[in-house]
Structures are given as C-alpha cells and as structure tokens.
Amino acid sequence: MSVLVDSSVWIDYFRAGRHAERLEALIEENQIVTNELILAELVPALQIKRQNALISLLREIERTPLAPDWDEIIRLQVLCLRHGINAVGIPDLLIVQNALQNDLRLMARDRHFALMSRHIGLQLEI
C-alpha cells in the first residue's frame, strides 16, 4: 500500500528531522505518492528559495487525483467535532478524504491526524 506524504513530513524531511530516515526508506522503496494540494502547500516556498531541482523531483512523484466528496468531508468534520477534535481545516480534511478514497496510508506529523485515525479508519504511517 502506498503512502501519501503530508507537507508537514516533507518540511521535516527537508530539515533532516526525526521522520527523515523513514521517509527516505519509503522513497527508496518507491512507496510514496502525493497530490496537487500537498504540492500547492510546498512549492511556493521552494520557488521563493529557488529550489528548482527539488521542485522538479517533487513533481516526479506519482500523484493521486483529488476528487473531493464534499458530503464525505462534512461527515468527517462532524465526526471530528463529535470526538472533540477541533480546528481541523478543510485542506487537511481533503488530504484525509484523498487517502481514504484511494486506500492509502497517510504519513503526517500533525497531531490531529493521529486523533482522527482513532475514529475514521485512517491508516497512519509511523
């Protein structure tokens, strides 16, 4: 099963943070995918820093298409709120929905993803 890598993990990876080794292994195993939303979160800052080679590499990663199901996103947000998981933004709900829709594991650093995984069947990559 492929892993959708959230922008929080990419940022950690670029800084050689604690997830760098695990992400490196997934890259070598060709297990990662991305989507346009995650690229839209990453590419602008990289363009400002003139990291063109890195942008090219990110754009070579297999992309999973975004097909927002707004009723499902509303359902996920209601479920979050019912379980006391507040302030989950629409972009993160789209990422979760994208992972669920395409049977992907999600690798993310943000705590609310871990909280959500307990209630919605989201598979997190550790």
Image (cartoon, grey):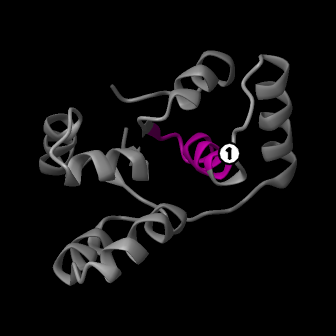
Report the quarter where the C terminus lies: top left
Magenta-colored span: 92-105
Name the residue located 51 percent from the left edge and 27 percent from the top edge. Answer: 111
Residue 68 in the image: x percent, y percent?
A: 73, 59
The quadrant in which the N terminus is found is top left
Is residue 93 visible in the rendered image? The answer is yes
Residue 5 appears in the picture as rendered? no
Q: What residue type is labelled 1?
A: Leu
Q: In this view, does 88 lie above or below 80?
A: below
Most common SS among magenta residues: helix
Give the structural element (helix, strand or loop) at label 1. helix
The quarter holding residue 122 reads: top right
Residue 104 colored in magenta in the image = yes
Q: Nearer the viewer, residue 112 or 123?
A: 112
Residue 106 location (% of width, % of height): 45, 38
Residue 61 locus on image (x, y percent): 30, 65
Relative to 21, 35 lies left or right? right
Q: Is residue 15 left or right of residue 47?
A: left
Judging depth in this view, the residue of 18 and 66 nearest the camera is: 18
Drawn side of residue 100 relative to residue 35, left or right: right
Q: Mark 1 points at which residue?
A: 93
Report the residue at 47% width, 61% height from top.
38
User: In this view of the protein, which residue sits in the foreground, 87 or 23?
Assistant: 87
Residue at 66% of width from left, 52% of height from top? 94
Q: Is residue 7 above or below residue 55?
A: above
Q: In which quarter of the image is residue 39?
A: bottom left
